[in-house]
Amino acid sequence: MILEALFLVLIGVITAYLIRHYVFTITALYSGKKGSNNENVRYKPKVSILIPAKDEETVIGRLLKRLTELTYPKERMEILVIDDASKDKTGEIAEEFSRKYDFIKVIHRRPREGNGKPAALNEAMKHVKNDIVLCFDADYFPQKDIVEKLVAYFADPHVGAVQGRVTVLNEPQNLVTRLVALERIGGYRVDQKARGDLKLIPQYGGTAGGFRKELVEAAGGWDSAMLAEDTDLTFRIYLMGYKVGYVDDAECYEEAVENWRAYWHQRQRWAKGHMQCAFKYMLPMLKSRKLSLKEKIDGLLLLHIYFLPLLVLLAWVLGIFLYVSNSTKWTAFLLNFIPLSIYSAVGNFAPFFEVGVGAYLDGRTRVFWLVPLLAFTFLYNMAICVTAFFGLCFSKIRRTRLSWEKTFHNGRGNGCLY
Amino acid sequence: MNKPRSLLNSLASGEKPLYLHVLIGGFFALLVFLAFWLLRLIENESAASSLLLFDFLFVFLLFPLKGRLWHKLALLTMGNMVGLTSSFLLSFSGVSEEENSRNILFVLAYPIVNMIWIVVMWAIGLSVLASRRRGIQ
């Protein structure tokens, strides 16, 4: 009886996520909003652009060259490259650009000055002069007019951060990059856009976006213990009474991970970081008077999304046990429902409704044959989330600090550009 | 310069859903299901539930999109045939729901097979409609 009730609860939670993704899909398809803020593109405040970089010699030059080509007035922006104790030529390449362009500055960090990207960003914040701060990872390649499109949202004083659209640069490289590209299509074109249109909680993604300097300072800087500094900032912004804007037409290319090992490490970091945020922000968010009810519901589902694969796995095992030991008709029916729910609710915010519809909206026609193969990444995500959960619990028990594992970029995406 | 795949030509959202297509699709799916049921082609409740799940997803996700109605109806019929065939193939291979015993192979394989054909048919349907839509644009 207890197990049956638990099984039903688990199915209920999975169904809630399924409905959420279905609603997002329908919203992205039929919402008339364009995901841009073109009426405010004349708003041109001074901006600082941060580029945290560690051992990025293969890609940093590509980004810096691109940033010199931006259409935003150069006298209204400063670019800060944070060379995070690189062992390769990242610092030298950045210095070369700095000598050539006076709006580019380089900050060199020494080894053991802090843990990963949050620590590097904290260091950079000491040097930031402007109120609006944008951030790009070193492997990114933005549109020339991305700054105008992103900062336009800050004309609204309630906007604390903005996020642009990320898409994969090295998509044709292999199967992994193609599948990551599909996840990105669903995650941004449908999921983020729908959350923006529905005034829920679009997520600041840590790159290809920006934030107000005063908010990060008011929050005491970046929490270097967090592995998902982007999710952390998103919820801090909402708890301070500000919003995050999603700008669908501010596009930026990224170099996606190109093998399953790198995928595992990157997603492990995301999953652990997200789970940290779930523990940190669940209660403050529910108690907050600055969030509406629908924001709280969406925030709750967003915070726990990386727990979902665990719940699906648990539901599956429990369902099979119930079927074999004491089958009822509804057990068999609900068991049928679970594998499809893996497609519909598990994954990096990009279940198959969203991936398919995102590709459809992008006018893509040949990528659909890959959609069934996403089952593999979803199952892989289940393993990632389960191990991330136990890894996090283990580190809590042993009181060890989680280490930031950097994603390696080899610059093969350059071949897709030139 | 060989530029990366541009998103600038991506198609804007804000389509108007084709409610009439959804209505006709729902009615047609019901007719197909009833025909299968009356002809005793649906072997068990699991086969029935997977067909209903497919019909629901297909009708509500694909029929509102731009595209010719007869294309969608053909794809829906094809999906139902594939679903029926998969349940036949599973029964012939000994993976079936049994009255008084618990078939562990059935409980493991049946949902996964269902997932595969449902998602494949849905992806094919979207591919067809996206191609047509791109052609129209």
Image (cartoon, grey):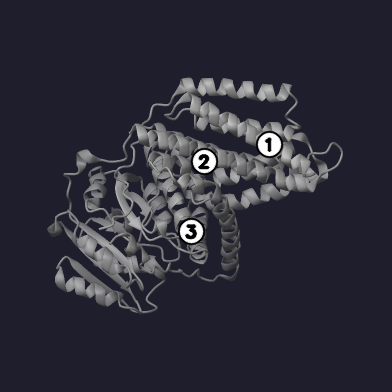
- The residue at the point 31 percent across, 45 percent down is A247
Above or below, B128 relative to A185: above
Amino acid residing under circle 3 = Val
- Closest to the observer, A59 or B83: B83
Same chain, labels 1 and 2: yes
Q: Secondary structure at mark 1?
A: helix
Give the SS element for disc 3: helix
Where residue A186 appears, as percent x and y from the top left, is 44, 46
Q: Do dots 1 and 3 share one subunit? A: no
The reply, left or right, for residue A132 in relation to residue A255 is left
Q: Residue at x 68, y 43 (%)?
A: B111
First in sequence, mark 1 or 2: give its number. Answer: 1
Quick check: marks 1 and 3 in contact, CB under 8 Å? no
Residue in the image at 41% along x and 34% along y: B132
Which chain is home to disc 2?
Answer: B
Residue that numbered label 3 is attached to? A176
Q: Nearer the viewer, residue B94 or A99?
A: B94
Instruction: State the separation of the CA atoms marked 1 and 3.
Output: 32 Å
- Dot 3 and dot 2 within a common chain: no
**In this figure, which residue is indicated by the disc labeled 2?**
B123
Structural crowding at the residue carrying mark 2, measured as other residues with C-alpha within 10 Å and reported as few (<14), some (14–19) or many (≥20): many
Image check: B76 left or right of A173?
right
Host chain of mark 1: B
How far apart marks 1 and 2 lie (CA) works out to 18 Å
State the separation of the CA atoms marked 3 and 2: 19 Å
- Residue at which label 1 appears: B85
Q: Residue at x 70, y 31 (%)?
A: B48
